[in-house]
Amino acid sequence: MAQMGRPRRFDRDEAVQQALHLFWQHGYEATSLAQLKAQIGGGITAPSFYAAFGSKEALFREVVACYLNSYGRVNDALWDDSLPPRVAIETSLRRSVKMQCEEQHPKGCMVALAVMSGGAEEHSAVLKPLADSRRRTLNGFIHCIKRGIAGGELAWDTDAAAIATLFDSFLLGVSTLARDGVSHSVIDSAVTALLAVWDANSGA
């Protein structure tokens, strides 16, 4: 049976990637339907957009899921207990810094930038997966530090929450540094300096 209507003039998966870059660059609230239509291209009209994606919010949710299942996995090492805890933290920091400085997509981390782009309270429901991801990263640092304490790598009185907050704050700040043009090599060197905090709390 022949298909009814005009065929779509765009590749849906490619369109999601294009929308991902746009939301990543500008945030949810500042990204308009007109910008999305222009970025997706293919002569897509508003009715075609809604037929393909449902709504701007639905597209954003799809984009966030795509981001978290790809770029957002740079911090998975924090939950990999097969790695020594210090190695897990260093791996996560360096992977995230590298990703945030890459040229083939917007600079910075979409998860971190979402909190800076405005409308967080008004759009809290749609932004919740990104807030959950930030919380998971912080908890991942705490998890590694507690493993370090339990294993004797860190002193028993190490303040896990404080040290985790220091690591987490650094990662949140990388987005601003990357967008301001600070080079990957400089930020990566800062990771080395930051890890001295772990060494200063060594249980040895």
Image (spheres, helix red, strand yellow):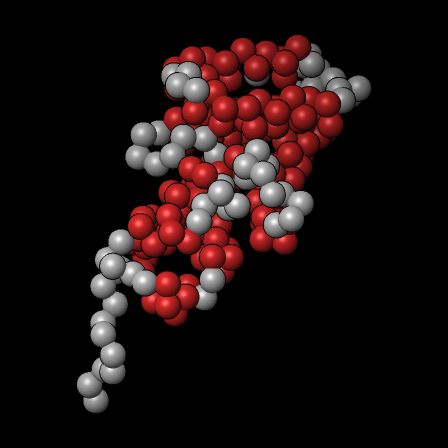
Q: In this view, does 103 lie above or below 111?
A: above
Q: Can residue 87 be seen in this view?
A: no
- Residue 122 vs residue 21, the one in the foreground: 122
Q: Is residue 190 above or below residue 19?
A: above
Toward which corner of the image does residue 149 lie, by quadrant? top right
Identify the residue shown where x is 39% and y is 26%.
101
In the displayed structure image, the side of residue 115 where residue 59 appears, left or right: left
Q: Residue furthest left?
A: 2
In the displayed structure image, the side of residue 49 where residue 163 appears, left or right: right
Identify the residue shown where x is 57% and y is 15%.
194
Toward which corner of the image does residue 198 lie, by quadrant? top right
- Residue 90 vs residue 62, the one in the foreground: 62
Q: Quadrant of the C terminus?
A: top right
* Rendering coords of residue 193 (x, y %): 54, 11
* Rendering coords of residue 129 (x, y %): 58, 49
- Residue 117 vs residue 79, the one in the foreground: 117
Toward which corner of the image does residue 202 lie, by quadrant? top right
Q: Which residue lies furthest to the right in this view?
A: 157
Q: How many labels does the image show?
A: 0
Q: Is residue 35 above or below residue 57?
A: above
* Rendering coords of residue 141 (x, y %): 63, 31
Identify the residue shown where x is 52% and y is 45%.
29
In the displayed structure image, the side of residue 47 where residue 60 appears, left or right: right
Q: Is residue 119 visible?
A: yes
Q: In which quarter of the image is the N terminus?
A: bottom left
* Rendering coords of residue 62 (x, y %): 46, 56
